[in-house]
Amino acid sequence: MSNADYWESETARQPWFASPSASGKKPTDSDADVPNLSDTLAQLRAIATDLVPVEAALLYLGALREPATLENRVRQSPDSASGDSSQSAAPGYLEELDEIERQFRSGDGETVELWQQLQAVNNEIRVKQRCVEALFWHLASGATGERSGLASAIDRMRDRTLQEEAEMQRSEIDRLSQQLPADALSRQAVNLFSDAGQAALGLMLEIEQRQRVIERLVLDDRSVPVAVTVLSIVYSVGVVGFIVLFVWLWGDGFLVESLGDRKLPLLGVPWPVLIWSLFGSLTAIVYRFLHRPFRRLGETAKWMWMRPIQGLLFGGASYLILEAGLSVLVDRLGSETPLPLADPTILVLSFLVGFSDRLAQTAFSFLEPQN
């Protein structure tokens, strides 16, 4: 006779169980309807041993699923909470079973009293099993749902490195979600304490942990370190001050004189073109600080130093390309003098080339060799 059949059988509710004098004799281990107490202790100990880690895992999963704002979810530490949950999930079942076994082997307690204690522990364990199973199905209901909000948050990330890492985590979540028995979970046809149930619980835990990693990456992308913020502010103020000072000191006649009369020796590029290209690159730096700031100090410093140099090179090269193209056009038209260049237009183009990497790449793409 199995332990489960015994606890639900009519024999377990006979008067002799509550009063040993009702039948005129005490039950013994040789009674056919009463299972061996040692075997029952071993069965209940095995059930309690399996129940404790399952309950701890479900409590940890529930902590990961706890609704909260993004910052609060990332700042809290469910890892430490999971360690405490494994201790709080054991309500002394194993200790009670050990005490019953000690009394049984030493003969300190009456057999019927020990059976009564054992039945009370069994009832507590079965109630705990029902609670754990209910918690599992409550958490499993959202395991196979859509995660469109997570995808949109990744798409709005500004840091490319963090975004790529978040995309890797999301692809792994999609792969793990495909391994979940979605149909069996929806029909509640999975035994939580079986191998399939343990595997499903493990997949659910890994999915939530990876989602927590993505949320931490998203929050990191939204926050800017203090050092980067201070450096960006100082640099931006310096850029604005440099532009104002330059216009104040050398702004007179800036657009009146012809660009052809202000070419630099050897380079053949008018210095106003380089200045406006520099202004464009500095404006791009300030724009990046305001809308898509860096999170790493090294990237910020590299952008501050190399972006102006890039603007100067692209601006000067763009002017030479434009001048060469117009010279060829004049030669084909047969004009004796080159067409006059619109100086304000050239300066505006120089500013745009210094400001926009995409415009510069478009301008230089015509020079790439074709395969």
Image: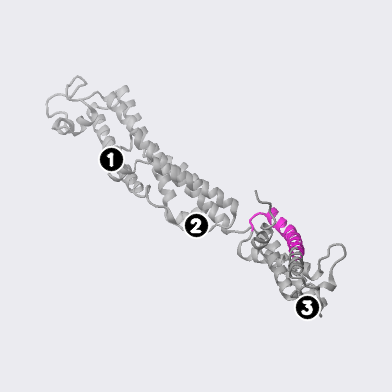
Q: How is the image coloured?
A: one colour
- Quadrant the N terminus occupies: top left
The quarter of the picture where residue 254 lies is bottom right
Q: Report the residue marked by disc 2.
A: 153
Q: Which residue is mark 1?
A: 189
Q: Secondary structure at mark 3?
A: loop
In the picture, measured across the screen, residue 116 lies left or right of residue 180, that is left
Residue 88 visible in the snapshot: no
Residue type at numbered disc 2: Ala
Q: Nearer the viewer, residue 298 or 134?
A: 298
Is residue 139 shown left or right of residue 322? left
* Residue found at the very far top of the displayed protein: 30
Residue 113 visible in the current orientation: yes
- Residue ID for mark 3: 255
x%, y% of residue 198?
A: 37, 36
The range drawn in magenta is: 294-320
Identify the amino acid type marked 1. Ala
Q: Nearer the viewer, residue 338 or 89?
A: 338
Category of crowding for the residue at label 1, using alpha-carbon neighbours closer than 10 angstroms: few (below 14), some (14–19), many (at least 20):
few
Sequence-first disc among 1 and 3: 1
